[in-house]
Amino acid sequence: MAKKNLNQIFAQNIQRKRKTLGMTQEDLAERLDVSQQSMSRLERGVMAPKFERLSHIAGVLQCSVAELFMEDRESRNCNDFEDRLAKALQELSNEDRDCMLRLALALAKVLKGS
């Protein structure tokens, strides 16, 4: 199996993380202040982000910069959870996804406090 280059890894990770958060490409492009065309090129691995933008991208996607460059096998446990959650969220409306996010954040806060 051919090894993926960093652009491909980055592209797959931002797409997966975006979907996990229930965002469209347009949503993410708006939050990153880039065009939807640029966002599409990033997600296809055609274009690489500027180094100084990586922290902002990671912040919007609620992950570390390192996670954006991890290959699947390096983050399989985390990714499995995220993929299962993304699949479940895909079937919901934007309003329901927002509700699920609020519930998950509240639950995480409660669990962290115990």
Image: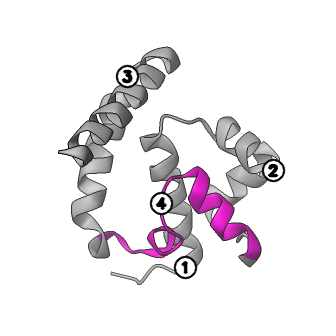
Q: Are marks 3 and 4 in contact (CB under 8 Å)?
A: no
Residue 107 located left or right of residue 98: left
Q: Nearer the viewer, mark 1 or mark 4?
A: 4
Residue segment shown in magenta: 52-72
Q: Would you name the residue on which mark 4 appears? A: 63
- Residue 55, compared with residue 17, is above or below; it is below
Instruction: Give SS at disc 3.
Output: loop
Instruction: Give SS at disc 4.
Output: loop
Displayed quadrant of residue 97: top left
Graded by Cα atoms within 10 Å as few (under 14), some (14 to 19) or many (20 or more), the crowding at tag 1 reads: some
State the image coordinates of residue 69 (x, y, percent, origin top left): 49, 74
Graded by Cα atoms within 10 Å as few (under 14), some (14 to 19) or many (20 or more), the crowding at tag 4 reads: some
Q: Would you name the residue on which mark 3 appears? A: 91
- Disc assigned to residue 6: 1
Graded by Cα atoms within 10 Å as few (under 14), some (14 to 19) or many (20 or more), the crowding at tag 3 reads: few
Tag 2: amino acid? Val
Q: Earlier in the sequence, mark 1 or mark 3?
A: 1
The residue nearer to you, when weighing 110 against 56, is 110
Q: Earlier in the sequence, mark 2 or mark 3?
A: 2
Q: Nearer the viewer, mark 4 or mark 2?
A: 4
Q: Main secondary structure of the magenta part?
A: helix
Q: CA distance from mark 2 to mark 3?
A: 27 Å
Q: CA distance from mark 1 to mark 2?
A: 21 Å
Q: Earlier in the sequence, mark 3 or mark 4?
A: 4
Q: Is residue 92 magenta?
A: no
Residue 87 located left or right of residue 32: left
Q: Would you name the residue on which mark 2 appears? A: 34
The residue nearer to you, when weighing 71 against 50, is 50
Tag 4: amino acid? Cys
State the image coordinates of residue 41 (x, y, percent, origin top left): 71, 58
Q: Nearer the viewer, mark 3 or mark 4?
A: 4
